[in-house]
Image: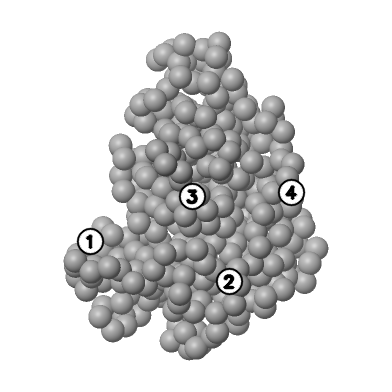
């Protein structure tokens, strides 16, 4: 099936409910928070053998998640240094599906409109190269309404494998479909149906270079009208995680057309015509029941993170998915996080002997 055929599929008439958690966090804050009040947050604390660094590393190793609280930090460059206690090698954001602007060094703005609901996902799951961890730095919190949620990967993997949906994902894998528009076709225009231009995603104005970069990432490239870049990527739905020596669920509906259910200028399109879509690896669609189950299996193991200014978080991209509901800002309110990606790795997919 080609992407064009997907455009004939009817849109779901209403949004699938997504709660992000049960109302109680799956992990207690005491398991992953590090209170920085006793620390000066000076250069000595950045040393790998410092008390803070050791505490941070231990928490991250145990849980797959660490959140520095009460840091007193406001400068993204300084916050990045503390994240780098765990993030030993940060990467540039290349080939990403959504547009991000650079804030400082390799700290990026979150590349999504605040009003958009961001379903649970593992970062860069739709590429041949992914990232082992992701770090969020809180610059401007929005109490309560601006929370991020993280979902426990061990629990969601076990839960989905106990369902027919999980077994189907295990057998068929998934296909990620993407349509990247040509920036030159949208100069000075309101971008109806526009999510990201291939020039921005691949940081080049040369279509051949963009294609080469996409192919290097394992994507199958086709060019449509108006230099619309269409890519397909077939991959297992699970990923082997060496640290725990087991396969982990590594796909989610954030890469399905429903990601755009609340995106201005895109939400009116049927799934197949949206800039991202996901099917099973045999190109068949998920049923509505399967979509709901796929959402629920993440929601059931969600933990709510209420941001405070200066928070530095590091999240293992295997052990946790992250997401958040849409955010509506009131008068004079802001909500700003920086994002830093960690070590890049080549996906190996699922291993038959590691279920
Ligand atoms: Fe993300």
Does residue 345 appear left or right of residue 350 in this picture? left
- Residue denoted by label 3: 328
Query: Could you tell me which residue is drawn at 35 percent across and 56 percent down?
Result: 99
Task: Name the outermost residue toward the right.
Answer: 162
SS category of the residue bearing label 1: loop
Does residue 253 appear left or right of residue 352 in this picture? left
Rendering coords of residue 350 (x, y %): 63, 61
Query: Could you tell me which residue is drawn at 56 percent across and 43 percent down?
Result: 145
- Check residue 204 in the rendering and tell me which mark sits there, or answer none: 1
Does residue 107 appear left or right of residue 271 in this picture? left
Query: What's the CA distance linking mark 4 and mark 3?
Result: 22 Å
- Residue denoted by label 2: 174
Rendering coords of residue 22 (x, y %): 74, 49
Examine the rendering and report whether any part of residue 88 can be seen: no
Q: Residues within 10 Å of mark 3 (few under 14, many from 20)?
A: some
Where's the C terminus, which quadrant?
bottom right
Closer to the N terminus: mark 3 or mark 1? 1
Query: Could you tell me which residue is drawn at 62 percent across and 45 percent down?
Result: 150
Q: Quadrant of residue 280?
A: bottom right
- Check residue 22 in the rendering and tell me which mark sits there, or answer none: 4
């Amino acid at each position: 099936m080609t992407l064009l055929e997907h455009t004939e599929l009817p849109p779901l008439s209403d949004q699938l409910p997504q709660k992000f958690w049960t109302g109680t966090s799956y992990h207690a804050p005491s398991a992953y928070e590090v209170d920085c009040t006793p620390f000066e947050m000076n250069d000595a604390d950045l040393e790998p053998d410092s008390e803070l660094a050791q505490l941070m590393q231990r928490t991250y190793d145990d849980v797959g998640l660490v959140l520095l609280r009460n840091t007193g930090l406001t400068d993204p460059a300084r916050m990045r240094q503390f994240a780098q206690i765990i993030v030993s090698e940060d990467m540039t954001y290349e080939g990403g599906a959504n547009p991000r602007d650079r804030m400082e060094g390799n700290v990026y703005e979150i590349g999504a409109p605040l009003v958009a609901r961001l379903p649970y996902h593992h970062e860069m799951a739709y590429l041949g190269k992914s990232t082992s961890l992701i770090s969020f730095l809180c610059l401007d919190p929005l109490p309560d309404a601006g929370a991020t949620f993280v979902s426990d990967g061990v629990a969601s993997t076990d839960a989905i494998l106990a369902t027919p949906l999980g077994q189907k994902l295990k057998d068929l894998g998934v296909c990620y479909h993407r349509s990247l528009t040509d920036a030159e076709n949208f100069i000075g225009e309101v971008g109806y149906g526009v999510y990201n231009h291939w020039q921005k995603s691949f940081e080049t104005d040369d279509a051949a270079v963009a294609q080469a970069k996409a192919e290097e990432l394992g994507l199958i490239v086709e060019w449509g009208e108006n230099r619309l870049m269409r890519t397909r990527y077939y991959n297992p739905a699970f990923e082997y995680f060496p640290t725990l020596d087991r396969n982990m669920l590594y796909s989610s509906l954030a890469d399905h057309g429903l990601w755009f259910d609340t995106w201005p200028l895109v939400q009116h399109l049927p799934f197949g015509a949206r800039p991202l879509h996901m099917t099973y690896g045999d190109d068949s669609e998920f049923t509505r029941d399967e979509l709901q189950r796929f959402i629920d299996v993440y929601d059931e193991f969600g933990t709510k993170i209420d941001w405070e200014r200066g928070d530095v978080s590091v999240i293992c991209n295997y052990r946790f998915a992250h997401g958040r509901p849409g955010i509506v800002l009131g008068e004079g309110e802001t909500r700003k996080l920086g994002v830093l990606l960690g070590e890049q790795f080549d996906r190996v997919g699922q291993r038959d002997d590691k279920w």
